[in-house]
Image (cartoon, rainbow, N blue to C red):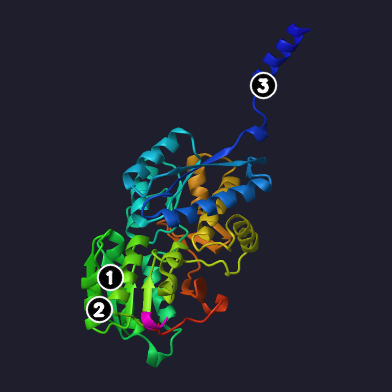
Amino acid sequence: MKRHVWMLLLALLALPLPAWAQTVKLGAVVPLTGRYGPGGAQVRAGYEIAVEQINAAGGVSVGGKKTPLELVLLDDESDATKTVARLETLAAQGVAAYLGGFGSDLHAAAASVAEKNKIPYLGIAFALNKIHQQGFKYLFSPFWKSPDIGKHTQGLLALIPAGERPKTVAIFQEKTDWGQEMNAAWTEAGKAAGYQVVVHGEYAPGSKDFSDLILKAKAANADAVFAIPTPPDGMTMVKQMKELGYTPKLNVMIRASDSPPWTKNLGKDGDWTVLAAGWHHAMKAPGVKELNDAHEKKFGRPSDPIVGPAYACVQIVAAAIAKAGAADHAKLRDAIAATDTTTVIGPVKFRPDGTGIVQAAFAQWQNGKQELIWPKEFATAPLAYPAPPFAKR
């Protein structure tokens, strides 16, 4: 009897794994620690909730069979060198596609690895346009880019009566490729939007003293500040603006103010800041309610602004796998390139250079919450303008 049982076990072990035991692996490298940690936390939440919800519905369709997704997520500690190493680790594990992290410099490092390994890569929280002009075929980003942000800044300013709009702007330019792009985009946008750049100050990421920039802006009586700092740099800028008695009527700080730590650390001083994460949980699209419900259950609040685009990346990959009929890298790449689908961030298509044709959005911190202010048809609150002095908040 014992011998029969043993022989049966050997026979069972020799059988191929059932379909439900197989998965399609998605490899994500995300900064969970370091300067981009708060943003990386949002990216992770979007990926994880998307995979959970897709698997709860049976998984992705591969050759007519439903197969679960498996998310393998590694922390690069906000270090581009580690981004590259972690992506190579994931390639060795046989991932079908790469999902990116947060911050244009990390994505720039990742794009070359994806191209070398010929593994499709989707990245958001990534406005750098330059990297898309290098002929990469495996890089895709369902996220607005520097030229888009510059162009749509005109829409943001159009929320203000013509006679009250900022006429003078100070650009605090980070000494990075993205900093250069946004400086050019905002300078160009001023021609149509009716403002003049009166202060153009550069700084190195990680700086501790921004007083020179701030005092120049104050002396020039700049109505607005446009900047793209990391979260630590942006918080330091606001604290030093307060200390130096400078309050711009409009403060646009992209990236730094995307995440909840902004208001936790700055309180009322962080209010009136405008952010450009490209999405907001009040935007109307299929699946947004279910995403918000899941996020509320996990974190006690509706989805943060980068969660939606991250969720959409998984939706795009899942749809492409179904279209390709396999997790083959080349077929999957072609299917992603041909994307024409509606996600939680709305309709998504890709241009030949991998940049996304997506809905754009600006939000603003008001009373410790991110309110959607543009486009007006989705707005949860009007733009609060002009900002009162820090001392009167």
**Label 1 close to label 2 by CB (< 8 Å):** yes
Q: Judging from the image, what secondary structure is the residue with disc 3 in?
A: loop
Which residue bears the numbered disc 3?
A: 15
Q: Judging from the image, what secondary structure is the residue with disc 2 in?
A: helix
* Callout in the foreground (3, 2): 2
Q: Which mark is residue 217?
A: 2
Q: Is residue 215 above or below residue 292?
A: below
**Mark 3 and mark 2: span between their CA atoms?**
71 Å
Closer to us: 87 or 204: 204
* Callout in the foreground (1, 2): 2
The residue stretch that appears in magenta: 389-393
The residue furthest right is 1
Q: Judging from the image, what secondary structure is the residue with disc 1 in?
A: strand
Q: Quadrant of the N terminus?
A: top right
Q: Is residue 69 left or right of residue 35?
A: right
Disc 3 residue type? Leu
Q: Is residue 62 visible?
A: yes
Q: Is residue 277 above or below residue 67?
A: below
Magenta region, main secondary structure: helix
Which residue bears the numbered disc 1?
A: 172
- Point 44% across, 53% down: residue: 40
Q: Position of residue 277 (x, y in %)?
A: 45, 65
Q: Position of residue 255 (x, y in %)?
A: 39, 64
Closer to us: 190 or 252: 252
Disc 2 residue type? Ala
Asked whether 157 falls inside the magenta stretch, the response is no
Q: Earlier in the sequence, mark 3 or mark 1?
A: 3
Q: Position of residue 298 (x, y in %)?
A: 60, 54
